[in-house]
Amino acid sequence: MIKMGLIGLGRMGKYHLNLYDEIPEIKLMGICDINEEEVNKLSKQTGVRGYTNYEEMLDLVDAVTVAVPTRLHYEVAKKCLLSGKHVLVEKPITTDLEEAKELFKIAEEKNLVLNIGHVERFNGAVMELKKIVRDPFLIESRRVGPYAERMKNDSIILDLMIHDIDIILNILDDEVVDIQAQGSRVYSNLTDLASVNLKFKKGTVVNIIVSRVNQKKDRTMSIAQKDAYIYLDYTNQDINIYRQGQSQHIFGDKELTYKNEYILERMFVYKDNPLKLEIKHFIDCIDNRSCRMVSVEHELKSLEIALKIDEILHKEGK
């Protein structure tokens, strides 16, 4: 049984809180937030002791989830690691690559688990990708949705695009050799939409679009390779595979029509709550029942690419 503490009771923190009672390997010992009213309300609802200073509960726990604002991730995660606690920190781990390296170094020296909350890794459809992707030519990813005021101070690259960067780096296992990025500010003082092109050493071209100004939410990825066109829907956790595509133009008396034929495979995907799977994986890593899903080097590479894109957009005033 892992004694757990939850630090941060915002939107993501509440998602975590709602799932702990579904994981029998966890005993939640404390919840913490600087908002005392929120702490008291949720403490009363759950029967779990509440705190406004997370350091006061560290002696009671083996591990913590850090779901505070990104600017506080480094400070809070470091104190928890130095106190000998395993840490699951929401993405991005930090907004500074050297700080991220330092946190992983502390975890290694103290033999602690430090996982980053990349919840899309545990999306059922994403977990199937490695089995079917083979030397793709082109990958196109869209992660768009409506604007929310709570987003205005967050980097759209570190908040949204880092999911897609992480997934693409994982399935390609290749080196990025060129980055091009364009963006625009619409509702906030930061980039609200961005289009990024990545070129990989083996030739794969990647286009990623993220936006928080679209009226319709859309989370998709398409992958073109020699034998198939793979279409993934993150929201529904679905994968469709199109094979043996043929097209032709049909000339009528007064019109020209286009015909496209293909064989469609609907891949079976085991669907579960991705966040629940993420938490269970963290616990399994602590109990040595499984190894971390991706290497520390991969964790750092995803952050490094995201920070480079942010830097390009910042220099362009986007």
Image (spheres, rainbow, N blue to C red):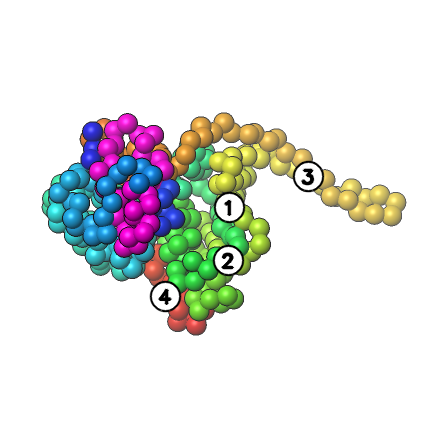
Residue 47 coordinates in the image, percent (x, y): 28, 36
In this rendering, the label closer to the viewer, 4 or 3: 4
Q: Are there few (<14), some (14-19), or many (20+) residues within 10 Å of tag 4?
A: some
Amino acid at dot 2: Tyr
Q: Is residue 309 above or below residue 66?
A: below
In the picture of the structure, the residue carrying the numbered disc 3 is 260
**Residue beneath label 4, please?**
311
Q: Position of residue 3 (x, y in %)?
A: 20, 35
Q: Residue at x 77, y 44 (%)?
A: 257
The percent coordinates of residue 316 (x first, y second) are: 43, 71
Residue at coordinates 34% horizontally, 30% vertically from top-left? 22
The residue stretch that appears in magenta: 16-43
Distance from the alpha carbon under mark 3 to that under mark 2: 36 Å
Q: Nearer the viewer, residue 39 or 223?
A: 39
Amino acid type shown at disc 4? Glu
Q: Nearer the viewer, mark 4 or mark 2?
A: 2
Residue type at the position of mark 3: Asn
**Label 1 residue SS:** strand
Residue identified by numbered label 1: 219
The Cα–Cα distance between marks 1 and 4, rounded to whole angstroms, is 24 Å
Q: Earlier in the sequence, mark 4 or mark 3?
A: 3
- Return the disc, 4 or 2, that comes first in the chain's sequence: 2
Secondary structure of the residue carrying tag 4 is helix
The residues bearing labels 4 and 2 have C-alpha atoms spaced at a distance of: 22 Å
Q: Does the stretch in magenta take in 88?
A: no
Label 2 Cα crowd, 10 Å radius (few <14 / some 14-19 / many 20+): some
**Residue bearing mark 2:** 147
Residue 84's place in the image compared with 94, above or below, is: above
